């Protein structure tokens, strides 16, 4: 189970850091195709991008370095909530294309949180 959790953590970390970086640095390229990004302020999307990047790093670094490994489980919870908030923003503004990506991230984060809190702490 530990190996599966590490693979899931690496995948989610990559997705969240890449997605967060896009939200921060490629806002102008993304916003024309996403109504929620046009409707809400760029500062909000930048903040969500920063949360995604920080949580992505926190999925790997604490356990990898053996310093406060419980942070990984909390980072997974943050990622699950973060993904659900973004899903709600997309649904509210009628964006259906990015939903599968964000919902897969939420499910992966929930699996990691469960695994690190309950199954393989």
Image (spheres, rainbow, N blue to C red):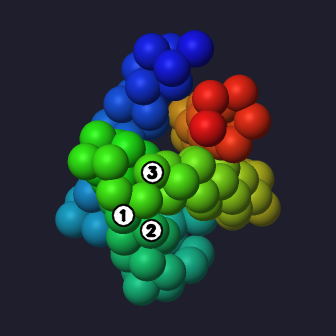
Mark number, residue 51: 2
Residue 11, position as x, y percentages in the image: 39, 28
Q: Nearer the viewer, residue 35 or 67?
A: 67
Q: Is residue 44 left or right of residue 15?
A: right
Q: Nearer the viewer, residue 2 or 90?
A: 2
Q: On the image, numbered disc 1 is attached to which residue?
A: 54
Q: Quadrant of the N terminus?
A: top right
Q: Is residue 49 visible?
A: no
Q: Is residue 76 left or right of residue 24?
A: right
Callout count: 3
SS label for mark 1: helix
Q: Nearer the viewer, mark 3 or mark 2?
A: 3
Q: CA distance from mark 1 to mark 2?
A: 5 Å
Depicted 90 relative to depicted 36: above or below: above
| Residue 112 figure quarter | top right
* Labels 3 & 1 near each other (Cβ < 8 A): no
Residue shown at the point (44%, 68%) measured from the top left: 51
Residue shown at the point (44%, 33%) measured from the top left: 9
Q: Is residue 11 left or right of residue 38?
A: left
Q: Nearer the viewer, mark 3 or mark 1?
A: 3
Of the residues under marks 3 and 1, which one precedes in the sequence? 1
Residue 71, position as x, y percentages in the image: 50, 58
SS label for mark 3: loop
For the residue carrying disc 2, how many other residues have a C-alpha within 10 Å: few (<14), some (14-19), or many (20+)?
Answer: some
Q: Is residue 101 left or right of residue 114?
A: left
Residue 24, position as x, y percentages in the image: 29, 68
* Labels 1 & 2 near each other (Cβ < 8 A): yes
For the residue carrying disc 1, how many other residues have a C-alpha within 10 Å: few (<14), some (14-19), or many (20+)?
Answer: some
Mark number, residue 69: 3
Residue 102, position as x, y percentages in the image: 59, 41
Q: Quadrant of the C terminus?
A: top right
């Amino acid at each position: 189970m530990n190996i599966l959790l590490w693979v899931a953590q690496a995948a989610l970390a990559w997705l969240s850091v890449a997605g967060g970086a896009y939200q921060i640095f490629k806002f102008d390229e993304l916003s024309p195709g996403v109504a929620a990004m046009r409707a809400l302020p760029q500062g909000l999307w930048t903040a969500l991008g920063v949360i995604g990047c920080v949580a992505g790093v926190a999925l790997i670094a604490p356990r990898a370095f053996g310093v406060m490994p419980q942070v990984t489980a909390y980072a997974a919870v943050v990622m699950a909530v973060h993904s659900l908030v973004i899903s709600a923003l997309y649904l509210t503004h009628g964006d259906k294309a990015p939903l599968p990506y964000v919902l897969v991230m939420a499910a992966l984060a929930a699996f990691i949180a469960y695994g690190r809190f309950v199954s393989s702490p």
